Amino acid sequence: MITLHHLNNSRSQRIIWLLEELGVDYQIKHYKRNEKTSLAPKELEAIHPLGKSPVITDGEQTIAESGLIIDYLMQTYGASQFPENTGNDNKWQSQYWLHYAEGSLMPLLLIALMFEKVRTAPMPFFIKPIARAIADKAMAAYAGPNMQKHLGYINSHLADKQWFCGEEKTAADFQMIFPLEAALTRGATRDAFPHIARYVDQVHALASYKTALQKGGPYDYA
């Protein structure tokens, strides 16, 4: 049986959604972030040396990294439910978004999150204006404009598509949902990116996604 090692408020929520869509037997082992640091607990290091989530075990296999997990589950269990992932142009389009999510979009979101933590972190009062000025300048000069550019690109892509690769879900959808959820909760406005907002709402309305939320537990991005 597949075991998903699931951390609250993490990328592993999208893996639960995929497992629900696949209809396979699986179980979830829950882990909670440290309330002060937001870091994963040490117990995850017993599953994978980096102590990160998501990680799945399937028989003798231990697989980490969201993109690889999604690819593995699709290839191993999803041939009948998701034929669009193999044998045609959608496969390569789907692979593009599978890599783009973590390679291009998530780094910008993490940079924005880090600078926001700098702005709000406890520090001596005389240092606060300096730290905030540095964070604001970095956001204005790099992270902010690049984030707007990438979200505009995605918004335009989704303008004439129901799902990322057309009329049917592919691996791309399970990978891209997390960064788009995160973007909408970290300042990206629905008015500026209506097609992204429509897409996220569409995913959230699915019965499989609602079940995944119930099984995954507290999740700040939905």
Image: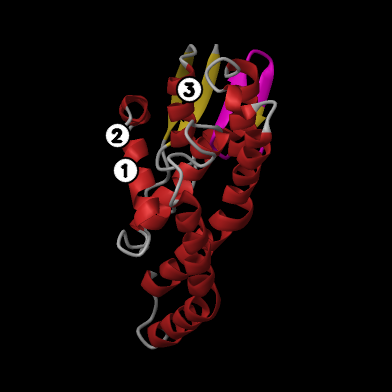
When the figure is inspected, residue 3 is found, relative to residue 39, above or below; the finding is above
Q: Secondary structure at mark 3?
A: helix
Locate residue 213: give its quadrant.
top left
Q: Are marks 1 and 2 in contact (CB under 8 Å)?
A: yes
Q: Residue at x 62, y 28 (%)?
A: 85
Residue 198 in view: yes
Q: Which residues are magenta?
A: 46-62
Q: Which residue is mark 1?
A: 201
- Looking at the rendered image, the disc whose residue lies closer to the viewer, 3 or 1, is 1
Q: Secondary structure at mark 2?
A: loop
Residue nearest the observer in this picture, 27 or 51: 27
> Local crowd at mark 3 within 10 Å, few (<14), some, or many (≥20)?
many
Q: Position of residue 33 (x, y in %)?
A: 42, 43
* Cα separation between marks 1 and 2: 6 Å
Residue 14's disc is: none
Q: Indicate left or right for 221 with 165 as reference.
A: left
The image quadrant where one finds the N terminus is: top right
Q: Which residue is mark 3?
A: 19
* Cα separation between marks 3 and 1: 20 Å
Q: Is residue 221 magenta?
A: no
Residue nearest the observer in this picture, 75 or 143: 75
Instruction: Choose the circle earlier in sequence order: 3 or 1.
Output: 3
Q: Position of residue 188 (x, y in %)?
A: 37, 62
Q: Position of residue 88 (x, y in %)?
A: 68, 30
Residue 205's disc is: 2
Q: Please, what is the three-letter code of the amino acid marked with disc 3?
A: Leu
Q: Is residue 56 magenta?
A: yes
Q: Residue at x 39, y 76 (%)?
A: 123
* Cα separation between marks 3 and 2: 17 Å
> Local crowd at mark 2 within 10 Å, few (<14), some, or many (≥20)?
few
Q: Please, what is the three-letter code of the amino acid marked with disc 1?
A: Asp
